[in-house]
Amino acid sequence: MAKKHFVKWTAPAREDINEIIEYISLTNPNYAIKILDKIENHIKKLNLLPERYRIVPELEKYGYLLYREIIVDYWRIIYKIENNFVYIMLVIDGRRNLEDLILKKIVLRESEI
């Protein structure tokens, strides 16, 4: 039987998702609701087998192996597995140049867990 994990959003990740949904809803409220539902449904599944998703490639090459990601449409949900917790660290637009952004945000958010 798979070990159960507890999923927790960091405050900055919650801010990320709120900003994304607010921005989308300015032009397409229906899509904003749809994408929020999709993201939340994927995150709900992290309580079982969070290791099923890939390690974040931009972090892996620097030796950060604790971070994984779920890709939902254009967005990347980056999370960290620690003991029996899964921490949602950030939600970002995958169309951006992400390497520096991810490294910077992950290092800053480590202290907020």
Image (cartoon, rainbow, N blue to C red):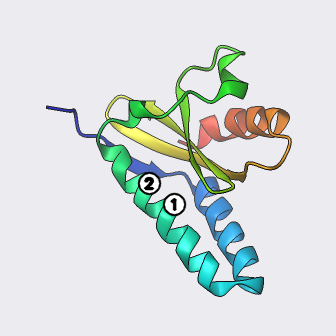
Q: Residue 16 occupies which quadrant of the picture?
A: bottom right
Q: Residues within 10 Å of mark 2 (few under 14, many from 20)?
A: few
Mark 1 nearby-residue class (10 Å; few <14, some 14–19, many ≥20): some
CA gap, disc 1 and disc 2 = 5 Å
Q: Residue furthest left?
A: 1
Q: Residue at x 30, y 40 (%)?
A: 5
Q: Is there CB contact under 8 Å for labels 1 and 2?
A: yes
Front residue (pair 110, 3): 3
Q: Which residue is mark 1?
A: 39
The residue labelled by disc 2 is 42
Looking at the rendering, in which quadrant would you find the N terminus? top left
Is 83 situated above or below 91? above
Residue 91, position as x, y percentages in the image: 64, 52
Element under disc 1 = helix
Q: Amino acid at mark 1?
A: Ile
Q: Secondary structure at mark 2?
A: helix
Of the pair 90 and 42, the residue shown nearer to us: 42
Residue ID at (54%, 51%):
10
Q: Amino acid at mark 2?
A: His
